[in-house]
């Protein structure tokens, strides 16, 4: 049955994917509302791409329930794919074709009429800030431009939801910001965005709500700010004593703030007031080589929940 305005765009219950004995996605539950920007945040291998492939009906689930735009992907793959915009992890552009022709050829796959596809392709080039490159061959574009073209291509069929698998992995900081700006605009226009990422800043920038995934399971769910409030302190003091001395120094810091994490290169002191924690460290006669106070982030949430960093 097609979806209604208030029904979730995507809903999963006990969604599971096994490859032989290995469970890549382990009974996850989530619901994504229309117009929401929803993220799967987790490290490499957490099962994010597998989940995206099940949503896009390009991989079958082993068990559980999944509804995408009101359809079951097991039976309605083509109907689902016709209404989704898909941005895979690796750009699959036709490198030898010109920029504009990549959009036109892709639009024709959907059986859309040529005059419509031509008009829409021009609009999307404008959106992707690639109008000046419309006649360039794809193999001459930068990584950021290729990503934007892949996003434009995913929008050719005016999708009800965009699936973006690690949209900015491999891009330099400036290209990431340009891309975030474009995705932010889509979000403002009300497009449902479903994205995977292992970058906490990307999740914080773009997601209204996210699930933190680890080893195929969801370990927490909420808005970025709610997750930070629930699982971390307001601020974090980062102190470095030199790699051989961090463990020993951490013992001297014990009792300051709410919690301490010792990483190979630094000690994190979780405290609502980071400056006060820094004074307390100095009062104990400890003098770190470097110290800084920052706000808590989703990286801290992940560390708290799993004991590991998002990016190795
Ligand atoms: N076709 C497959 N056969 C066997 N194992 C697979 C297959 N596809 C994925 N896996 C395994 O399932 C786990 C989850 O992979 P998945 O690609 O979904 O993770 P991910 O969170 O998207 O990470 P990445 O960003 O590295 O893609 C990994 O351990 C991966 O090796």
Image (cartoon, rainbow, N blue to C red):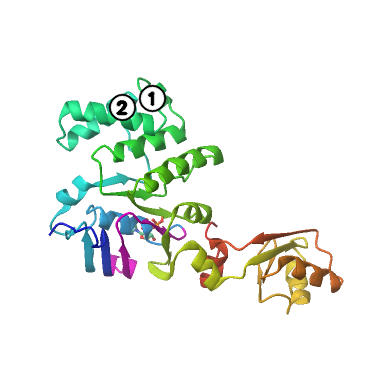
Residue 170 lies, with reference to residue 235, above or below; the image says above
User: Relative to the observer, which residue lies in front, 115 or 61?
Assistant: 115
Q: Position of residue 288 (x, y in %)?
A: 80, 63
Which image quarter holds the N terminus? bottom left
What residue lies at 45% left-to-right and 52% top-to-bottom? 206
Q: Are marks 1 and 2 in contact (CB under 8 Å)?
A: yes
Q: Position of residue 306 (x, y in %)?
A: 51, 70
Q: Answer yes or no: is residue 171 visible.
A: no
Ligand 1 quadrant in view: bottom left
Name the dominant secondary structure of the magenta segment.
strand
Which image quarter holds the C terminus? bottom right
Q: Position of residue 139 (x, y in %)?
A: 39, 26
Q: Answer yes or no: is residue 279 visible.
A: yes
Task: Determine if the magenta segment contains residue 276.
Answer: no
User: Relative to the observer, which residue lies in front, 74 or 271?
Assistant: 271
What residue is pinned by disc 1? 131
Q: Position of residue 210 (x, y in %)?
A: 42, 62
Residue 145 lies, with reference to residue 304, above or below; the image says above
Highlighted magenta segment, given as a residue range: 14-43
What residue lies at 74% left-to-right and 67% top-to-bottom? 246
Mark 1: which secondary structure? helix
* Picture disc at residue 122: 2
**Left or right: residue 128 compared with residue 170:** left
Instruction: Please tell me how crowded label 2 is: few (under 14), some (14-19), or many (20+) other residues with Cα within 10 Å.
Output: some
Instruction: Please tell me how crowded label 1 is: few (under 14), some (14-19), or many (20+) other residues with Cα within 10 Å.
Output: some
User: How far is mark 1 from mark 2, CA to CA?
Assistant: 7 Å
């Amino acid at each position: 049955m097609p979806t209604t305005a208030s029904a979730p765009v995507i809903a999963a219950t006990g969604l599971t994917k096994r490859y032989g004995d290995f469970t890549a996605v382990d009974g996850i539950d989530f619901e994504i509302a229309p117009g929401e920007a929803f993220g799967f945040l987790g490290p490499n291998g957490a099962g994010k791409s597998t989940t995206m492939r099940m949503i896009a009906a390009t991989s079958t689930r082993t068990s559980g329930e999944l509804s995408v735009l009101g359809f079951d992907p097991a039976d309605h793959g083509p109907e689902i794919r016709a209404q989704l915009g898909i941005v895979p992890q690796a750009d699959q552009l036709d490198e030898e074709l010109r920029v504009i022709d990549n959009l036109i050829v892709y639009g024709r796959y959907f059986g859309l009429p040529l005059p419509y596809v031509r008009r829409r392709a021009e609009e999307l080039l404008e959106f992707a800030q690639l109008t000046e490159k419309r006649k360039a061959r794809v193999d001459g574009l930068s990584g950021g431009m290729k990503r934007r073209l892949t996003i434009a291509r995913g929008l050719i069929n005016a999708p009800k939801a965009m699936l973006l698998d690690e949209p900015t992995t491999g891009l330099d900081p400036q290209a990431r910001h340009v891309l975030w700006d474009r995705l932010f605009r889509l979000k403002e226009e009300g497009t449902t965005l479903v994205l995977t990422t292992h970058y906490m800043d990307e999740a914080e920038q773009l997601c209204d709500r996210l699930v933190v995934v680890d080893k195929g399971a969801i370990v927490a769910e909420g808005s970025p700010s709610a997750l930070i409030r629930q699982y971390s302190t307001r601020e974090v003091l980062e102190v470095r004593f030199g790699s051989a001395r961090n463990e020993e120094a951490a013992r001297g810091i014990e009792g300051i703030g709410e919690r301490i994490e010792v990483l190979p290169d630094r000690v994190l002191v979780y405290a609502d007031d980071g400056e006060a924690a820094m004074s307390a460290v100095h009062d104990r006669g400890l003098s770190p080589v470097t110290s800084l106070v920052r706000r808590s982030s989703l990286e801290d949430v992940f560390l708290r929940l799993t004991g590991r960093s998002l990016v190795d």
